[in-house]
Amino acid sequence: MSVLDGPRIERRQVIVRGSACWGTMTGDMLHLDDGRSVDPRDLVHLPPLAVPPSKIIAVHLSYASRGIESRDNPKPTETPTYFTKPITSLNGHEGELVKPDGVAYLNYEGEFAVVIGKLARNVTPDEAWDHIAGFAPALDMGAQDFRDTDQGSMLRVKGMDGFCPIGPGIVSGIDPRNETLRAYRNGLLVQEARIGEEMIWGPDYMIADIARYITLLPGDILLTGTPQHSRSLDPGDTIEVEISNIGRLRNRVVAGPKPRAEGIGHPPMDTPEVRRVALGFDERVRPDLVANYREAAIRNGE
C-alpha cells in the first residue's frame, strides 16, 4: 500500500521514564503501543525513525522561489543535485541547536523529510511512493561560515551535530504536495510555500533519481529542499517548521563554546559568498517575510 493511501496516521517516538517508547497520536494524546496514554508535551521526543538511517541525503535547490533568491533563476539546474549529512546530525523535536562560538551565520531551512520504509533500488517515480514510510517536518540547519571549504560537499556547513532536527512524528496518509510549508522565527512567519506549486521535483522523482545508482534502505532520510528566505539565527531564537496536516517541529538555538583544538583546520569565514547565501540578496519575492524576520530579531533584542 502506498504511503499516500489510507487515513492519516502519526507515529512518535518519545522517552517515558527513561525508556524509548512508540505511540500513535489521537487528538492531543499519544497512545503508546503498550496501552498507556500520555501527554506528548511533557516528553522528550526522539527522531521518529523505526530503524537508524544509513544515510541522510539532501537536495540543494528544489523550490522556484529559492532559485530566484539565490541564483536569480527559478530552475538553476536542469536536474536535482544532492549532498549528504552524517547521521550524527540527527536531532528531535524541542532539541537544542548549538551555535558554536565563532560561527556568525547559522541558517534555518524549513523542509519536509521523506523517511524510507522499504529498500528502494532501480525504481520508477510511480513505484517510489510504495517505498516511503512517511513524512515529517525537518530543519536542514547550516553554518554558512564554512561554505568556502570542503569543495562544496557541505560537510561542515550542514553536517554538524544536531543540524538535522526531524519530527515530532512521522505521518502517512497525507500527500505533502497538497500542503503548505511554513517556518516561524520567534513566532513570526519567515518562510511560506505551497509545496505542490513551488517544488520543481517531487519526492517521487528524487527517490527514483537517487535509486538509479544508490540503494535507499529503511530508515534513510531524504530532505526535500527549502523555499526562499533562509536566514541566520542567534542564541535564544526559536525556529519552528510546520507542514500543514503533518506537524510542527520546534527547536531553540543555544550558544556553544569554540572547539578545544583551536588553530586546526579551516576557520569560519565571513566572505561575500558566505553573506550572499546567509543573508540573501533578493527581497522581491516576499518582502513581508523579510519584514517579519526583522521584527522577530527586534523581539529577540538584536
Image: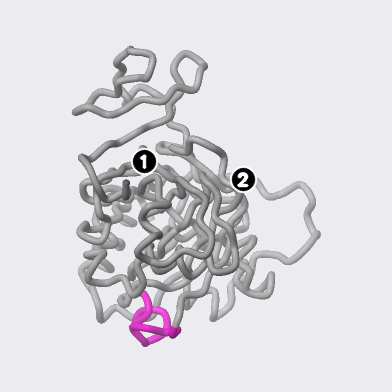
Residue 36 pos. (x, y %): 33, 12
Based on the picture, tell me whether residue 121 belongs to the magenta stretch. no
Q: Quadrant of residue 195?
A: bottom left
Q: Name the residue rendered at 68%, 50% in the picture.
A: 258
221 to 126, vertically: above or below: above
User: Callout 1: 10 Å neighbours few (<14), some, many (20+)?
Assistant: many
Q: Name the residue rendered at 32%, 25% in the picture.
A: 40
Please state which of residues 221 and 168 is positioned toward the viewer in this rendering: 221
Judged left or right of residue 298, residue 18 is right
Amino acid at dot 2: Thr
Label total for image: 2
The quadrant in which the C terminus is found is bottom left
Q: Quadrant of residue 251?
A: top left
User: Callout 2: 10 Å neighbours few (<14), some, many (20+)?
Assistant: few
Q: Quadrant of residue 170?
A: top left
* Circle 1 residue: 170
Q: The residue tagged with tag 2: helix, strand or loop?
A: helix
Please state which of residues 40 and 258 is positioned toward the viewer in this rendering: 40
Mark 1 or mark 2, earlier in chain: 2
Magenta stretch bounds: 66-78
Judged left or right of residue 205, residue 242 is left
Please state which of residues 82 and 98 is positioned toward the viewer in this rendering: 82
Is residue 295 visible in the rendered image? The answer is: no
The label number, if any, that marks residue 88 in the structure image: 2
Q: Name the residue rendered at 46%, 63% in the picture.
A: 123
Answer whether labels 1 and 2 touch (C-beta < 8 Å).
no
56 to 253, vertically: above or below: below
